[in-house]
Structures are given as structure tokens and as C-alpha cells.
Amino acid sequence: MKVARKRIFTLLAVIGLIIPSFAQITTDQLSGKTNTVTSSVPFLTITPESRSGGMGDVGVALSPDANSMHWNPAKYAFVPNDLGVSISYTPWLRRLGIDDINLAYLAGYKRLDKNQTIGFSLRYFSLGSITFTDITGNTITSFNPNEFAIDGAYARAFSDKFAGSLAFRFIYSNLTGGIPVDGTESHAGTAFASDVSIFYRNDELRISDYDATFAFGVNLSNIGSKISYSKISEKDFIPINLRIGAAYTVDFDDYNSLTAAFDLNKLLIPTPPEYYSDSVDLEGDPVIEFGYDPNVSVPVGMFRSFYDAPGGFVEELHELTYSAGLEYWYAKQFAVRGGLFLEHNTKGARKYFTVGIGLRLNVFGLDFSYLVPFYQENPLSNTLRFSLLFDFAGLKGK
């Protein structure tokens, strides 16, 4: 069975190779041997909204808003309003010349009382259209693969500075529509996951003569079941991720403020081992030379992810990704943003700058971001994100 050349990366996902569609590695970019940590449903790791998208993909410790579900649901406990909603849209991988791959994101929150808030989100990823053909090139059928995740979260403030949250997620991934691939029956994959997060914020600080706020956040996300697309294939890890970050805001006066933020990420799933090139076991499987067997349970895989890289501690450090961003606000109405994202060459080689702007008018807000990669001919080039936000203050009792 064949697929049009423009859809080859989608077919790779269909047959379970779990290659991240958002990463591209070329020989000129690499300084060493590649050993990329990959997972199924990588759309869960794509930045879905424009504020953080303009700040190098930071977000775990930024001030709370409707999009806190993706970054740190615990932030919902400190949202200033009673109700907020955000709608975001990202045309994806336009550099590849494919115009029907898109990520849509709907998120929001509702305050229950002074200390409790609930949040929700819906993430929908459309991978365009695939035309399935037989061996002679005759069209069998067409299908629009898609994936989505539905989230719900409960956040509680334990003090005026500290909050925690639990979130739950249902994941659905339909890449084939039940069409047999290479003679193997397929089906949609489903999984369940949860997030555990904390958020600390101290807005009573001073730096020189200026008011300042320090925030710190941790989000352990997508702790959940593995996923499979056929009865005979092994189940794959979803992108369990640990995100840690901090943000520092200085209010220069009533009109001008500046926030600097930094995030660190690590996938808590097994690193592919290195195998002997000329040795197999009694069952015909390759024998591991360095590293560990990746076919383990979720708890074991999470624990081992801190030390299972075949290259040892140095390779473990290479698996970290770094995000840094700045956000300047004027009169709390107009924002200018910039950021940087870095991933090691041997782990995906995603390196890019981001810029963005924001506008707030009463209950309405608009954010826009633009991505500029380090390297030319990168599939992430010219990525745009758009977000509309609606924050409704003081709805309770009205």
C-alpha cells in the first residue's frame, strides 16, 4: 500500500514509527550521533497558544490566564477573574507545502470560590488528507487522520502564595480510519493521562525602588497509559513530561512592566538503547549493547528515564530542552514578546527564536506569535499562532 509523497511523514506515524512530525534533522546540523527520544501522539507537546509561543515556549511560571491548562493547571488558582476562555489556532508545517495540517485549542476556567478553580481544554490536531492506493497506484480511499485530547483540572490555593492542581486527560488518535496498513489491521488509539502541578507566587517583593513578583512552577504532565494502533503491535509511550520553570516580573511604574521567564523540560520516557550490529538473541531480537530495554511499564520507564541513556550522564543532559522569554507590557494593554528555544543536536536539533505581540481591551484579548528557526529549510519555518482571549471579571452575582 502506498501514500502520496507529500504525506510520507504521516504514514510513518500511522505504522507506528512514532517519529515527531515537528522535528527535522539534517547532517549539517548534527555534531554527534543522533538518538532522539520519541513518543506517540507528539501533538500533546506542541505549544498550542500564542503568548508562550512568542516567548520561546515558556509558560509553567508565567502569570495565569485561560491557557494555563497546557503549561501548569495549578496557576488557575490565582486567575484574577471568575471566568475566562481562549481560542487558539496554529497552521502547522506550512514549510513542507502542505496547507491542511492545523492545531486548534480551546481552553478556559471557572472560579468556584476564593480558593478553588476548575479548568478545561480541548486540543484538536488535523493531519490533512491521506490517499490510500494499491500496489498499481489505483486509489482505494481517502481519509482525514486526526487526534484530540480533552482535559479537565481542579486547582486549589493552599495559601496566598502556593497552589496545586490535578488534571485528567482523554487522548484519541485516529491515523488510519481502520484501513489496513501493510496488511495489518489498524484501529484508533486511545489513552488516559493525568497531570500533577504546583505553583508558587510571591508578589510582595521589591527590587531597588520597584515592585516585583517571583513565580515558580512544576508540571508533571501526561502520566498515563500507553497507546497502540493495532492488536499485534506493542504499545507506545505517550509524551510524559517534566516541566520546571521560574518567572520574575518587575513593575517599573503604573504603565511599564517586564517579565523574564525560563523553562526546562525533560521527557520521562525510555531513551532508545544501542544494539550490537551483528548479534541477536534466541528470539531473533537485537541484543542491547548500551542502555536498557525500552519495553517496560510506565512507572519503570519514568524512573529509568533519568539514567537510561546509552551515553550516560552526558547524554541525559542532552535530553533537556531550554526555553527563555521576555514579555514587556505597556499599561497592561499592549505587549511585546521575544524568546529562544534550544534542543541538543543529537536529540532533535530544534533551535529557534520567537517573537509576538499582545493586545488587551476590557474582556477581549488578542495574541500573535511568529517562529524563526536557526536553520534554513526547517519545517517549523514561518510558524504562526493566533489566540483570542475572553476574561469576564466579577460575573458572580451578576
Image (cartoon, helix red, strand yellow):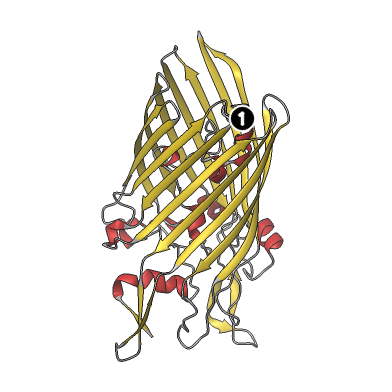
Examine the image and state in which quarter residue 80 appears. top right
Circle 1 residues within 10 Å: few <14, some 14–19, many ≥20: many
Residue at the right extreme? Answer: 158
Residue 279 point in image, percent of width and height: 57, 83
Examine the image and state in which quarter residue 378 appears. bottom left
- Using residue 306 as the reference point, say whether residue 7 is left or right of it: left
In this rendering, does residue 309 appear at all?
Answer: no
Quarter in which the N terminus is drawn: bottom left
Residue closest to the eye, 85 or 212: 85
Q: What residue sits 53% from the left and 18% below the top?
A: 212
In this rendering, does residue 34 appear at all?
Answer: yes
Residue 111 point in image, percent of width and height: 63, 34
Residue at label 1? Answer: 78
Q: What residue sits 38% from the left and 57% below the top?
A: 102
Examine the image and state in which quarter residue 29 appears. bottom left
Residue closest to the eye, 65 or 312: 65
Residue 5 point in image, percent of width and height: 30, 74
Residue at the front extreme? Answer: 398
Give the amino acid at mark 1.
Answer: Phe
Residue at the top extreme? Answer: 209
- Using residue 241 as the reference point, say whether residue 92 is left or right of it: left
Residue 304 point in image, percent of width and height: 66, 59
Residue at the bottom extreme? Answer: 136
User: Regarding mark 1 in the picture, which secondary structure is present there?
Assistant: helix
Give the answer, above or below, for where 220 lies relative to 156. Answer: below
Quarter in which the C terminus is drawn: top right
- Using residue 360 as the reference point, say whether residue 266 is left or right of it: right
Residue closest to the eye, 86 or 98: 86
Marker count (numbered): 1
